[in-house]
Image: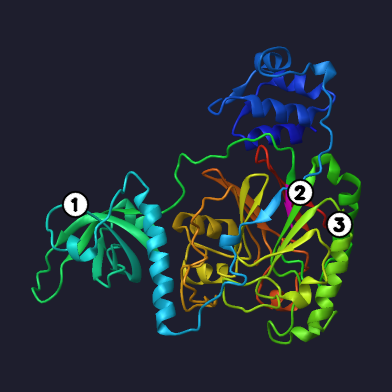
Amino acid sequence: MRGEILSAVERRNMFLAPDAYKLVEENNEPMAFINSILNAMKDNQIFITKQDVLDFMYGDKGTMKEEKYIKPAVKFCSDIHVVDSTDITGKSTCTGVIKDFSKYFQDRYRSIKRILESNRKFGQSMPLAKALSYTDREVHVVGIIYSKNTYDNKSIGLKIEDDQGTICNVYIPADSPASKNIFIEDQVIGIIGTPRKNKDKDKPPSITASEIINPDVPETNNWQISDSDSTIAFLSDVHIGSTTFLDKSWKKMIRWMKEASTSINLNYIVFPGDVVDGIGIFPDQEKELSIADIYEQYEALAEYLKDIPDHIKMVVHPGNHDAVRPAEPQPALNDVFTKMFDSNVILSGNPVYVEAEGRKILTYHGRSIDDWVSNVQQLTYNDPIAVMKQMVVMRHLAPLYGQKTALAPEEKDYLVMNTIPDIFVSGHVHGAGHLNYRGVRMINASTWQDQTDYQRNHNFNPEPAIMPVVHLGNGTVKMMNFRT
């Protein structure tokens, strides 16, 4: 119990004085008690003293007395829905012609430009053509990266383009803090810099950057504590139909849900893709299938989900193993599969925003993690949270075009992170972890599949049977391990 209490305090970046800890420990419900105290503390408070606890117990900060503390009653809620404008399902218009690609990248550019210009530090930008007409004065421009070069002296050269088709070279000196940024093709950035005439008069001027502005989440963004008592869980990469599906661990988790989920008001579960193992996803996959028919895989999934308590609402969306188009954004499973599931299961596209009791949850399977790792030296499969952080910094889930992640050129780029989420969850790489980045709870949601031969041959070690649970009121994250 001591470890759980101190962990709860540490997650809020606070410290609990020893005599204050003793008061908490003596309470009939110490975990609920400390969470209530933490919720009552000021945002900038670091130390919790004995007097703080006494003030909470008997003063104006709380209404309960220590000896009369009553555990809140269980509340069953069903306040969860998919944000329709973020779901591609039923809205796809792309045909693959050049015009579609133009609209797609124009929308990406303009969407992220709006985010950049909302940053007071960056402000209003100007078209590249106009900016290049100035020399020796600071300009603010927005560009999509066409290419990147790193020179021997560690300086960086970018070739960028704006929505008017103007192309410009940007030079970032080696001693500039901006040179430490991660840059990838098709990323949209803001540039503060000075245009310089080229010594070769036949070549256009370039811009020497003094600062690179990423769309990012503002430093001032934080989790706004609410009065919700509900929690939400995430179960990614279930892989029903695989011979390595962890049936015993899954059943252990189901037993816990039936016996104890009400104790933490678990009312919602999101499944971030790869709910079944699929067919023909990788070479010789059929050797690793316990169910070789795609329809039977989903029928088995539907039966497994029936074991989850009826009061829990579920959102299920596809990943790259599921029976939808591989190109992202992916639509929800079609009607052939929809009828297999009970009414407490909501099927959506990937990615999608979900709202649960006012909390904005961005759920994305995470196929693009492959491309991030392949193209950015600093990123690895062992740390998917670092990849997710870059997605947040760039406000895009899959910037790179023409890589492993197929992108459908829709009129709208559904992979732009237009809205700052409270929770951002992904899966795909079978890792487990979480991080609070500028108020956004980032979660990589494990898997329910043991290591496959394919993974073993590629030296890939999963972290299975871990269920992340987030408290929708205070934002605390708990990683529950059901590995048997």
Instruction: Tell which of 93 and 261 is nearer to you.
Output: 93
Query: Where is residue 80 drawn, in percent x and y?
Result: 70, 51
Position of residue 146 relative to residue 112, above or below, is below
Q: Quadrant of residue 120?
A: top left
Q: Which residue is mark 2?
A: 78
Magenta span: 232-236
Q: Which mark is residue 235?
A: none
| Tag in front: 2 or 1 | 2
Residue type, label 3 = Ile
Direction from residue 121 to residue 439 in the image, left or right:
right
Residue at x 66%, y 18% (from the top left corner):
61
Residue type, label 2 = Ser
Give the overall secondary structure of the magenta segment.
Answer: strand
Q: Which residue is mark 3?
A: 308
Direction from residue 162 to residue 224 in the image, left or right:
right
- Which badge, 3 or 1, comes first in the chain's sequence? 1
Position of residue 386 relative to residue 87, above or below, is above
Query: Where is residue 252 drawn, in percent x and y?
Result: 89, 56
Dot 3: element: loop
Quadrant the N terminus occupies? top right
Q: Which residue is mark 1?
A: 138
